[in-house]
């Protein structure tokens, strides 16, 4: 008898490149290493996938679930085991119920269920959370189908766009020059955003770290943010408290690497006004591995809407310590005093603990060396992730279809 093929269909219809898409990349690699034929359905307007995945990855551009149904129905093969389907955002309730009956349906929970509850989630055979923080949020909403072990993630430092970075997918970074990239994620469907995008690209909207300039460290302590500037990070709220604190430490520089929507960047700039001379905005970067070693510390955003913080894991794996709020999920991914420092939520103490930490760092407190925390970093290795994924997929196979309850 011929061995049955193992097929996994992933569905990620996001239009912009973020942490969930990086997660999709290293999940695809792990699936293939576990012997699956990996097929990825992506939105036809998301142009970044060809540069993000390996050249031989099978990518199917679609616009609707109906198109996905047609592709999978047309690939029916008696030699293939009941296909595995993994979604990266929840299917609508009716579709989730139907897919769970037809396939082994699993879903990634990339965000905590904070003030949100997609109605399709109870119908999945299994939900895979990226942290204990996300598991707790899902269980608090009554979900019974959450895998009990978080998958966490991998410090995937392959360039975000292999062509732009000048490397093949999977090739490590070299630590070359870092140039400013685009600061805004424009919605090209809007006339205003198309005009503003042209204005930015023309270089007429000059800014610190403007397009074409090269990053060079300034004297003093260098804090960095390496992240998309999105609402879940809550950077404007955080800096409404911390910017006046940092203004009292002029030897501290803040370098921000990442792009965001117009409103997110606008609100961040407003919050940073008290320390504007200490801040430079560098926009989107394709080769983040070359950035982390140029920073003294990587700074997180606020915690509760965060699911994991892949950027903090990446920084630690590059031996760059991190600074984060003492709360989940950061208490899962940072070892206080060994891979970085945790501080009290500034919304509780008005930044007093953070101010004390800055005073210590400016006075010469030794910088942690994350690479020495080998057991901690091993949790985020490709090997550890692959083992957790294999166990999670076994749980999908043993689960029965149908509604799982809340």
Image (tube, rainbow, N blue to C red):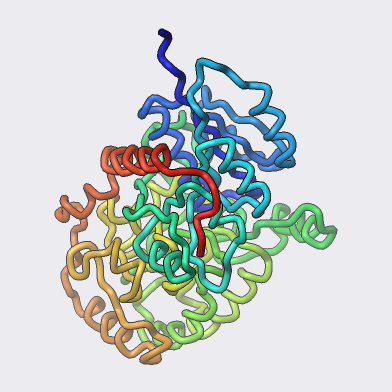
Q: Nearer the viewer, residue 273 or 17?
A: 17
Q: Is residue 182 above or below residue 138?
A: above
Does residue 157 appear in this view? no
Q: Residue furthest right?
A: 191
Q: Position of residue 321 (x, y in %)?
A: 27, 62
Residue at screen point 19% across, 75% down: 364
Residue 357 in which image quadrant: bottom left
Q: In what quadrant of the picture does the N terminus appear?
A: top left
Q: Position of residue 233 (x, y in %)?
A: 50, 69
Q: Nearer the viewer, residue 243 or 216?
A: 243
Q: Is residue 329 above or below residue 392?
A: below
Q: Position of residue 134 (x, y in %)?
A: 42, 63
Does residue 309 appear in this view? yes
Instruction: Count every numbered label the image shows and give the total.
Output: 0
- Taking the image as shown, residue 380 lies to the left or right of residue 364, namely right
Residue at screen point 32% across, 41% down: 391
Q: Is residue 1 above or below residue 193?
A: above
Residue at screen point 38% across, 52% down: 147
Q: Is residue 34 above or below residue 322?
A: above
């Amino acid at each position: 008898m011929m061995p049955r093929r193992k097929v996994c269909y992933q569905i990620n219809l996001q239009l912009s490149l973020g942490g969930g898409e990086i997660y999709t990349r290293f999940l695809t690699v792990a699936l293939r290493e576990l012997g699956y034929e990996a097929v990825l359905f992506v939105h036809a307007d998301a142009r970044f996938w060809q540069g993000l995945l390996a050249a031989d990855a099978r990518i199917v551009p679609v616009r609707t679930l109906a198109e996905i149904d047609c592709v999978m129905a047309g690939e029916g093969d008696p030699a293939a085991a009941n296909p595995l389907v993994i979604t990266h955002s929840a299917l609508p309730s009716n579709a989730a119920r139907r897919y769970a009956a037809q396939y082994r349906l699993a879903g990634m929970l990339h965000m905590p269920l904070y003030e949100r509850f997609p109605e399709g989630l109870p119908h999945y055979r299994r939900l895979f959370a990226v942290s204990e923080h996300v598991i707790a949020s899902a269980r608090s909403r009554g979900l019974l189908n959450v895998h009990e072990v978080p998958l966490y993630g991998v410090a995937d430092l392959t360039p975000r766009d292999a062509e732009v970075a000048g490397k093949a997918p999977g090739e490590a970074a070299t630590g070359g020059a870092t140039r400013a990239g685009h600061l805004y994620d424009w919605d090209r469907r809007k006339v205003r955003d198309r005009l503003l995008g042209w204005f930015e690209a023309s270089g007429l909207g000059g800014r610190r770290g403007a397009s074409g300039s090269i990053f060079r460290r300034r004297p003093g302590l260098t804090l960095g943010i390496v992240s998309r500037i999105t609402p879940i990070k809550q950077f404007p709220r955080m800096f409404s408290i911390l910017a006046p604190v940092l203004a009292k430490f002029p030897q501290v520089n803040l370098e921000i690497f990442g792009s965001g929507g117009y409103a997110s960047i606008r609100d961040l700039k407003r919050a940073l006004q008290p320390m504007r001379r200490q801040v430079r905005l560098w926009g989107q970067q394709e080769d983040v591995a070359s950035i982390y070693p140029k920073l003294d510390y990587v700074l997180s955003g606020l915690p509760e809407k965060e699911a994991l913080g892949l950027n903090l894991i990446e920084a630690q794996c590059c031996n760059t310590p991190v600074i984060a709020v003492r709360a989940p999920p950061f208490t899962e991914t940072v070892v206080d005093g060994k891979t970085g420092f945790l501080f009290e939520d500034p919304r509780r103490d008005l930044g007093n603990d953070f101010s004390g930490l800055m005073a210590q760092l400016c006075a010469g407190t030794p910088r942690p060396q994350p690479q020495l925390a080998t057991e901690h970093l091993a949790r985020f290795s490709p090997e550890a992730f692959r083992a957790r994924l294999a166990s999670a997929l076994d749980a999908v196979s043993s689960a029965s279809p149908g509604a799982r309850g809340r």
